[in-house]
Image (cartoon, rainbow, N blue to C red):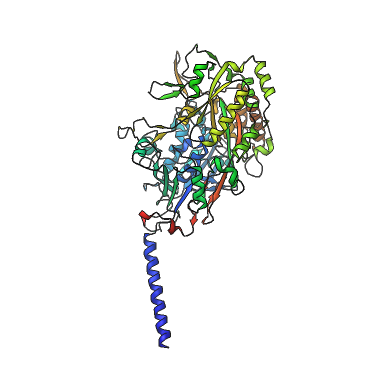
Amino acid sequence: MAKRALALILCFVMLALALAGCAKKDENDLGAYVYMYLTDMVYDLDPAHAYENEANLRVVSLLFDNLFVLDENGKVKKSLAESYTISENEQAGEYKMSIVLNETCWTDGVAVSANDVVYAWKRILEMDHSSEAASLLFDIKNARAVTEGEASIDDLGVYAVNEKTVEILFEGKIDYDQFLLNLTSYALVPLREEIVSKSEDWAKKPSTISTNGPFRLREVVYGTKSDEKAGKTQRMVLERNVYYYRDIQEDKIDKSVTPYRIIIDYSKTDEEIMQLYNEGKLFFVGDLPLSVRGIYSELVEVKDALSTHTYIPNQDAIVRYYNKSEFKKLTTNESLVMGADGAKHVVSAQELKEGVDGDKIFAKTEVRKALSLAIDRNAIAQAIVFADAATAVIPNGVFETSSAKKTFREVGGELIKTNANLDEAKALLESVKVDASKYMFTISVAAYDDVHMKIAEMVKASWEELGFHVAINAIEVAENSEVYKVTGEVPKDILDDMFAEYYRAGAFEVAAVDQVAFSADAFSSLAKYALKFSGQALTMKQTDKGTEYEFAPHISGYNSEDYNKKIEEAFAQKDIEARAAILHQAEQMLVDDAVVIPIIFNKTATLQNKDLSKITETYYGTFNFKKSKLKDYELYVPVETQ
């Protein structure tokens, strides 16, 4: 009996010690360090630029919380919005929506407020700010008048009634479900005016950015010269936002966000990435490296990305006559000129002087069609592995009306031939007396994107078969040269994405870009090609009548009166089925005019370690790690933090 009692006492002692050990461990345990390769390096985390590249969107979605989200099944769900109400007074002609925000904070502890929503939306619509996402908000009272310079930004029908309530006035009765779908776009996330107004580079490093999502930007090492000298590894670290839907005094540290850090090491080769994954040291691969896609094609989870990789011929570009010595400069990336601001720019329509030896051949529909016909989209899709040959402008997954049950592409069908037809392409060039061998031009592409570079090589080969002399202008990132006005100094620890900057400025002859859908509504992707829906900043000019504003067309230079009318018709049509029919007509017009050249419909292909669980996705193909769990994560905590 005594032995049994002694054994029982010893058991209690051991249990107490174990519990004490656990308590001590829990006290110092911040959570999992999740090592992954999420995307290529991202150089600008401004949500306004998130739709220029799929990689940007995937990181931005982890840093910013939106009013509403589109879940994996295509359902609109509340996120930052706690509730919303709709009220109509037909007699007074008043239609409005009130949105009450949940209690949460930015990464510096400041409460997210209704003013942050109002500021972000006004920023999108300012007439001197370019944003192709502007049409997402055109149902709002005076939104179009603001973008057209006919009303002050203060006349916009969006107001902060109090700290937590946003009131939205509409021009008239609208399809509210469609408007809520628009609000799932990350282009419309709240932003802090006091943060954003300090610098155009506010979203590039931890000390200048503030975010309201589950994670904050803890560290980013871009690989600048100073980084290399210091021996720093190119990487990005996201860390739990301790203020995200949490009472910092009362709630557990991991109440709303389970993992402590997400660590992305960009210094590894493709082979090293996959080796680390196979060894169980890398837990998630969100962007499978191109060189190994064939090997792992049967193991990945593949989904549509609501994105079309597209080539945009600049209709304003003067395409130069072929000159052997000058073409050699193109092929060696020496075709740069020094701008007035001291920065280097790609030779473009804006900077080529009048009388230059060349023609605006991209302004001819037949030439653009010939360029499109020469491309074997099937071959490119096979080379990229995780892609479909593009059959139209709008990608797979975009809604036909207001749900995922029927997609725009399923109804619209195939509008573009996916195989090459060189004979027809050459006949089109002959019909407008364009001798391809007389011309040379560049394809501008982001040098850091292996997939984009591979596509550029294949497109170049196709266009050379027509006789054109084509060079790939692989644009690298550059060390920042702009002054941060708060300190009066030039930050040297950030890099500028020069491809994105040249593209936004229209400084290209042909640009290779991902056209990522702003929302699951086809209108926002088609409207930007219409003059008054392009979202481009207005240009001011002085006339005899005073200051006048001119609309800027889509960045391609496209401006069709018929297309403009078609988009106006679609915008005015409030019956969702009838509107969809008009949008199909609009897409057909874009294809007939060959405004842009769709190449492939992008897909996401991911690998996930079995020890990592509870990752959710949105319909847009972005990932949510806030509740993800890593088994035995204590084994992977860096030694220096233990």
- What residue do we see at 53% from left, 19% from top? 317
Tell me, yes or no, if residue 248 can be seen here: no
User: In this figure, what is the number of numbered marks?
Assistant: 0
Q: Residue 363's image quarter?
A: top right
Q: Looking at this view, name the residue that lies furthest to the top.
A: 355
447 is higher (above) or lower (below) than 605:
above
- Is 295 on the left or on the right of 204, as rendered? right
Residue 198 is situated, as x and y percent measured from the top left of the image, at: 36, 35
Residue 411 is situated, as x and y percent measured from the top left of the image, at: 69, 37
Q: Looking at this view, name the residue that lies furthest to the bottom.
A: 1
Residue 397 is situated, as x and y percent measured from the top left of the image, at: 62, 41
- What residue do we see at 66% from left, 42% from top? 406
435 is higher (above) or lower (below) than 126:
above
Tell me, yes or no, if residue 278 can be seen here: yes
Q: Quarter of the image containing the N terminus?
A: bottom left
Residue 154 is situated, as x and y percent measured from the top left of the image, at: 43, 32
- Is 581 on the left or on the right of 454, as rendered? right
- Is 105 on the left or on the right of 599, as rendered? left
Asked whether 543 or 355 is in front, the reply is 355
- What residue do we see at 41% from left, 84% from top? 5
- Is 481 on the left or on the right of 541, as rendered? left
Asked whether 29 or 449 is in front, the reply is 449
Asked whether 479 or 156 is in front, the reply is 479
- What residue do we see at 37% from left, 23% from top? 342
239 is higher (above) or lower (below) than 204:
below
